[in-house]
Amino acid sequence: MKITVIGGVNADVSGISLKPVRKADSNPAHIHMNAGGVGRNIAENLLRLGARVIFVSAVGDDLFAEFLRERFAVSGLDASRLVVREGMGTGLYILLLEPAGELFAAVNSMEAVESITPADLENIRGDALASDLVILDANLLPETLDAAARLADGVPLMADTVSAEKAGRVEGILPRLSLLKTNRAEAAVLAGFPLDTEEALREGCRRLLSSGLGEIFVTLGARGVFCASGEGMFMLPALPARTVNVNGAGDAFAAGAAWRYCLGGASGISGGRGAAARGLFGTAAAAITVECAGAVCENITAGKIYERLGSLSKSGENNEFL
């Protein structure tokens, strides 16, 4: 299985507050720095699941870039296709978490990643065309997303909308997508109206599917994920987990769904299990990830995901989808 991922890479600086966060005040916290970025997190998760991964992104020429290269070496992720932008800052994501691991607020700077141009992608045309799936994230600018989609002509394409601020960037490639991973706020940007009720969520997904998009996964945090495709629309609940850090859960979901998609081929899993199997696999990957301190769980494997799903099967939960 070969998957090309083109998207964001950054250093994550996370502070987990020791007490409930107080606005406009200095909050004592445990502070950590890890490698991050939606595209990079998806790529490392896929690597740990057993895929051959080509990761394409851009960094600056600063200390954060050196830190990321060290982390790439530790994880085994290939850094050879990172574009280096002299004089630019490497992507940085600073987040503040509540004691229970829930996100309070975050800020980001993605100058280097947003500098990726269509011309930068020409060097990986062969990799993209030889892939089972190409994954893009909305840290890329619209013209680069469009160029990447054209570059991957004939190869299944997946996109992650990243944030409500950036979700609109993928609008132009919706008809080309086999899979879209998004959340409620991001999907609302693409649908053009609030998705604050289940009926609105269904209508929004219907509108997006009418563009030619294949499948949509709308992650809803602790509520689970809403799945929509030609097979129908349904909700999958979040799996039980001992939450340590929610950062990276959505990226793990995307990687799990992508891995299962490639495993089953473009026509899905036999027995009508396509979208449901992908959603469940992603949900289990997210549950494992929130139990870890980092944005990517170092212990995640396809076997552990199957074990998590197997425990549900024995208990009878979600049995109709397994």
Image (spheres, rainbow, N blue to C red):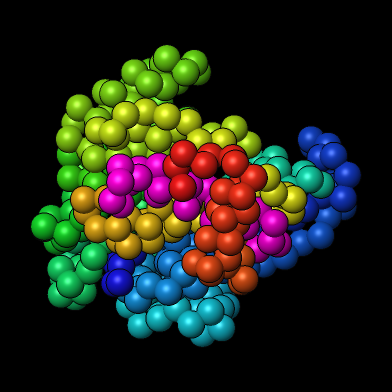
Residue 48 visible within the image: yes
Indicate left or right for 283 with 86 as reference. Answer: right
Percent position of residue 262, x then y = 30, 61
Residue sitting at 17 percent across and 45 percent down?
Answer: 176
Residues 308 and 157: in front is: 308
Classify residue 260 by image quadrant. bottom left
Q: Which residue: 26% across, 23% down?
A: 207
In the rendered image, the vertical position of residue 88 relative to residue 173, given as above or below: below
Q: Nearer the viewer, residue 236 or 4?
A: 236
Judge whether residue 293 is colored magenta: yes
Position of 64 relative to 321 (above/below): below
- 10, above or below 29, in the image: below
Quarter of the image for the N terminus: give it: bottom left
Is residue 158 left or right of 302 when viewed as pictured? left
Residue 43 highlighted magenta (yes or no): no
Against 7, residue 193 (above or below) is: above
- State the image quarter where residue 233 is shown: top left
Q: Give the range drawn in magenta.
A: 269-294
Q: Is the magenta stretch mostly helix, strand or loop?
A: helix
- Answer yes or no: is residue 95 visible: no
Residue at screen point 29% across, 72% down: 2
Residue 259 at what x, y percent from top left?
38, 61
